[in-house]
Amino acid sequence: MSNLNGKFKKILKELEENIQDKESLEFVKIQMFNLYNMFFEELEKTDEINNKKILAILSTQQEMLEKINALEVGIRGIEKDIYCDDEDEFEVVCPYCNSEFEIDELKDEVICPECNNTIELDWSHSCDGHHCDGCHDCDGENEEDDM
């Protein structure tokens, strides 16, 4: 803007140098000031309109970010439900056909997907003879048997 202001002052100086009649010079100066003011009023209006548009865009952007964040929270919940539910599933080996498959801990019996035999599940974690491969009571004995 300072460069524009300097150019305006230069034009006024050239007008003063080239217009000898004082009344004509004053009239031209007033008209130049009016033109100058109209130009800046239009710039201010344009600036105000642009600022309102920018604020509207920022507001819309904020709303969109809030919606995206809400969607991300929902998606994380869905991902947790679908993909992170592995802690409630356990791998079982069918005693009839040796097929391995995953089951839910809450079930007392399952049907083997390979041989269709019903398998009763005991979640009490007790071992009668301590000759199994998976109970916590037999970990020490199984290590001793391997030596």
Image (tube, grey):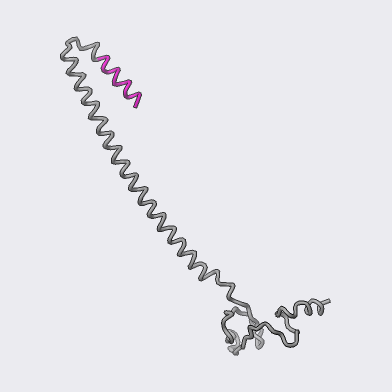
22 left or right of 102 in image: left
Which quadrant of the structure image shows residue 71? Answer: bottom left
What main secondary structure does the magenta stretch of the protein show?
A: helix
Report the residue that reaches farthest toward the right: 147
The residue depicted at 59 percent of the width and 76 percent of the height is 89
Along the line of sight, the residue nearer the viewer: 120 or 11: 120
> Residue 44 magenta-drawn?
no
Along the line of sight, the residue nearer the viewer: 132 or 126: 126
The residue depicted at 29 percent of the width and 19 percent of the height is 9
Q: Which quadrant holds the C terminus?
A: bottom right
79 above or below 133?
A: above
The residue depicted at 29 percent of the width and 39 percent of the height is 48
Report the residue that reaches farthest toward the bottom: 117
11 above or below 133?
A: above
The residue depicted at 65 percent of the width and 82 percent of the height is 93
Along the line of sight, the residue nearer the viewer: 103 or 115: 103
140 left or right of 108 in image: right
Which quadrant of the structure image shows residue 64? Answer: bottom left
Q: Which quadrant holds the N terminus?
A: top left
Q: Position of residue 107 (x, y in %)?
A: 57, 83
60 above or below 131?
A: above
Q: Position of residue 108 (x, y in %)?
A: 58, 86
Q: Which residues are magenta?
A: 1-14
